[in-house]
Amino acid sequence: MDFPDFSLTAKTMEEYRENHWPNLEEAIGRLLVHNPTDHISVSYAQIYSYVYRCVCQQHSELLYNDLILKITSHLQQVSTHLEASPPENIIENFSDALNRYTASLQCIVPVFMHLNKSYIEPKLNRDLKMELMKLFADHVAEKHVNTLISLLVQANATPFQVQPSTMASIVKGLYSLRPEWAELAPALFSSFIPQINPPAVESLLSDYAAHDKKLQMELSLNGFSRSVSRGCSLQQLPVTVSTTFPKTADSISQMCCCCFFF
């Protein structure tokens, strides 16, 4: 009967604690905080080598737990920074935090590929990138989503208060983290994510048209002139809906107002 070499196990554990993990922790920390547009002097080959040794020395579980704790600690600091931000800076600060984090994962996930393939996927039935994005959702986005969406709705009502690219990036990012967050502000999310609304219903076509006509009247009362192209009126506009209703409510609304120019 073969017995494990406990002296070797103790030696590799000491090597992990004194050499492998400290070097990995430092590299991960630098990747998490660096600006995506700046150069960072990190040896990815060296990081991969440390990860490979840890897995081969049967420290996969320990390495995974240390990695999760390290990134969780970082994200808690990010959340604290957002809490201290004045309201006018929250949107930009959240956008910066999300972009910086997703950029760092593009570096972290590949160098931990061996851990993902040999431990996380087969043993935990998970994926490393999805796990790390879930950490951001749990420790950052979830804590600020209500305030953030409220500010986004206000900003969306005032053109160019926030750059459209920033708005789109945040809304799409929130939706990718948790699609159910779209229910908090359906109009906002549907402005940036196509076909997010439920399919149009034939029985509500008159309601869609009435809503669109009301919008046109409100715009007219607020100083926008309205003209009709080629003598076309809202009532005359042909609308064809198939029995399968492939159109969404948004697209039906667009069809109803396509003949108006401002």
Image (cartoon, helix red, strand yellow):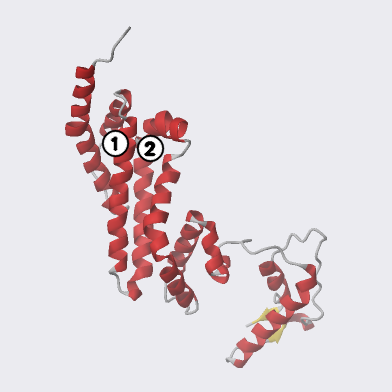
Q: Nearer the viewer, residue 153 or 158?
A: 153
Asked which secondary structure carries label 1, the reply is helix
Residue identifier under label 2: 110
Instruction: Report the amino acid beneath label 2.
Output: Pro
Q: Are marks 2 and 1 in contact (CB under 8 Å)?
A: yes
Q: Residue 195, percent across and down?
A: 63, 61
Q: Residue 214, percent across and down?
A: 68, 85
Q: Residue 85, percent across and down?
A: 29, 70
Residue identifier under label 1: 44
In the displayed structure, 217 sits above or below 17; it is below
Rendered residue at 73%/66% (across/down): 200
Q: On the rendered structure, is 137 left or right of 231?
A: left
In the displayed structure, 68 sits above or below 91; it is above
Mark 2 Cα within 10 Å, few/some/many (few <14, many 20+)?
A: some
Q: Nearer the viewer, residue 81 or 160?
A: 81
Rendered residue at 42%/49% (across/down): 133
Mark 1 Cα within 10 Å, few/some/many (few <14, many 20+)?
A: some
The quadrant where residue 146 appears = bottom left
Q: Report the disc number at residue 188.
A: none
Q: On the rendered structure, is 159 left or right of 10?
A: right
Q: On the rendered structure, is 57 left or right of 187?
A: left
Instruction: Report the amino acid beneath label 1.
Output: Tyr
Determine the residue located farthest toward the front in the rendered image. Answer: 1
Q: Residue 148, percent across and down?
A: 42, 69
For marks 2 and 1, the one nearer the N-term is 1
Rendered residue at 73%/81% (across/down): 210
Determine the residue located farthest toward the top in the rendered image. Answer: 1
The quadrant where residue 100 appears = bottom left
